[in-house]
Each structure stands twice: as structure tokens, then as C-alpha cells.
Amino acid sequence: MAGLALAPAAAGKVHGIVPPRNPAANVAPSPNYDNCQSDGYCVDEPPCYAPASFAAQFSSPDCVDAEVQAIDNARAKEGVGPMYLPSDYASLTAQEQLLVVIDLERVGRGLPPIAGIVASMDGVAQKGTQVAGAPAGTFEDPAFPGGFQIGAGARFAWRCHGSASGFSCDGSGQPGAAIAAGGDINALDADYGWMYDDGPGGSNFDCRTPTASGCWGHRDNILGRYPTRSAFTSGAWGSSLAAGAKRRTTLVMGAGALQPDGAGGPQGNFTAIFAAVVGRARLVYTWKQARAAGAGRPTG
């Protein structure tokens, strides 16, 4: 998982468990929507599995409802309210669905939402869903390539401070954070693994022991407190930093999905990459659109 640049919270009252705190243990999904056991074996039974019709079943209303119930039960253990999907959720692309569920996890805990998806960042995230030259199904955390630019009029924001040698910038060399998941049936399934099964003994490959540095790393990146104001920006990844007047930043993301289709295995891979930017970033799908369609609001 890519490093995360932390900054002070920029929202109202925080609810539930947020970084640097993490859950004490994984939460088994209830209901067990995909009928999977601790050894990874999944039974071909409803609501999310059916013999010879994997892909169709993964997007069925019954499967989605069961996934949301499981997420709501896990959220309740943290004192976080239910997740309400937008009315058009079923018609959204997998990338748009990832923005919706990730933002619902953030705003449900009082954190500011990701403003939307940047097309060029989608391209970066998509490359992580199938690693070039690797066997089919191989996935990895996406990373910005050298020289990557967010788009005309926008620059990456960094949280930097003065030091004896000049300036020191938080993070591990990437201007944001990234997550990836493999063998998941849809965006909600990926979200459950990232948020509630990311600790020791769970689905996180980087958390095989209780003291492993990667434990809860996906969750930490989803709930990251990214820079909300920045006096330092980078025009292109790898270029030198330039000081300027402190300006407000916008949290954006890219998402990738290798959709499950039943060929070579029924499940898919999902990725996301996050960054705060200064300037106007062109968004192809926004949290504002999701909110207009009812995201975060009960329908009854």
C-alpha cells in the first residue's frame, strides 16, 4: 500500500473509528452474503452466487441488499449509522460505485468526502487491476508514473514543513495513497474487505501477523485525513516543489475495476488511488451527483 500524507481533519465531529485508531479485530460479514468460509472457499448459493451465472448474480438486488446489511452491521459496531446507496447505484459503473461507497464510509464518520473521479487517475488505477506481463488476475496497488500530471490547471498538493536541510514532505514519495483488492465480486465486496476485514487473519495480504506494518492500511487510506490547504504544489510527479500562497485543496480519486465475468474465475479486481490537488481538476463523476441521487439519505 502506498504511503499516506496526513493532515488535520477538515470536517465536523468525527464518529466511529478513524486513523490513527483501528478496529480491535476483523468483523465477519453478517449476513454472510457470498457464502465464503475463512479458508476462502465460497459455496455456489444465493444471494451472491448461483451456478453458471456468477456475473449476473453479483449485481442482483438481493446480493447488493445483503452486502449493505453486512456493512451496516459492521458500521453499527463502531457507532456509525447505516449506508444509504443512491437510487441509481445499479446503473453506475464499477468505478463510480467505488467512489460512492468510499465516500459513504468517509462521511459516515464525519470526514470530508472525495469530490469526484478524475479520468486520468482512473487510467492509473486501472493498470493496477491487471499487472502487465503477469498472470491473469494479478493485481497491485496503483502508483503514479514518473512525470504524471493531474490535468491542465491542477497540481498535486503536499503537506510540507521546513527543516534544517530545507523542506521535508510527509508521505513515501507518492502524492497520495492507493488501495487494491482481488477476488471480489463487486465494489461493495471490495469495500467490506478494505474496511472490516483488513486486520490480522483477514483478507489483507500485508497483515499476516498482528504487528505487520500493513495491517488496516487499506482502511487507513480510505479514511485518510488528506491535506485541506497547501502552500506547496507539484506540477508533475517528480518535479521540484515550489512554494506559494496557501490555497485550498480538493480531494479526488481514480478507480479501476476488472469486472467479474465468469471467465478464468468468477471474481474481479478493484483499485483506487487518492490525492489532494490545488486548482481545477476536471471530474467525470462527483459526490455531488451521488448526493443528488440520494446517497447518504434514507429512502423511506
Image (spheres, rainbow, N blue to C red):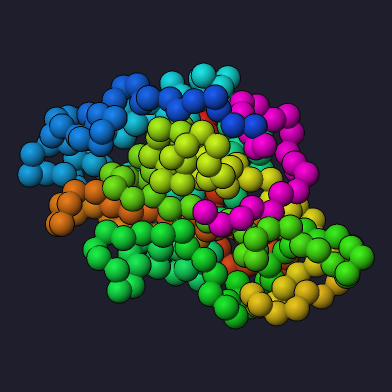
Range covered by the magenta-colored residues: 1-20
From this view, report whether residue 113 is shown above or below residue 249: above
Depth check: give the residue in front, 138 or 117: 138
Q: Magenta stretch: residue 16 in it?
A: yes
In the displayed structure image, the side of residue 12 where residue 161 appears, left or right: right
Residue 37 in which image quadrant: top left
Residue 9 spot, x, y in % from top left: 75, 41
Residue 98 spot, x, y in % from top left: 44, 49
In the displayed structure image, the side of residue 286 where residue 155 appears, left or right: right
In the displayed structure image, the side of residue 91 where residue 76 appears, left or right: right
In the displayed structure image, the side of residue 106 where residue 41 appears, left or right: left
Residue at the far right: name it. 164
Residue 248 spot, x, y in % from top left: 78, 58
Magenta highlight: main SS: loop
Residue at the far left: name it. 52
Q: Which residue is drawn at 86% across and 60% down?
A: 161
Depth check: give the residue in front, 176 or 63: 176
Q: Residue at x 51, y 20 (%)?
A: 76
Q: Magenta stretch: residue 52 in it?
A: no
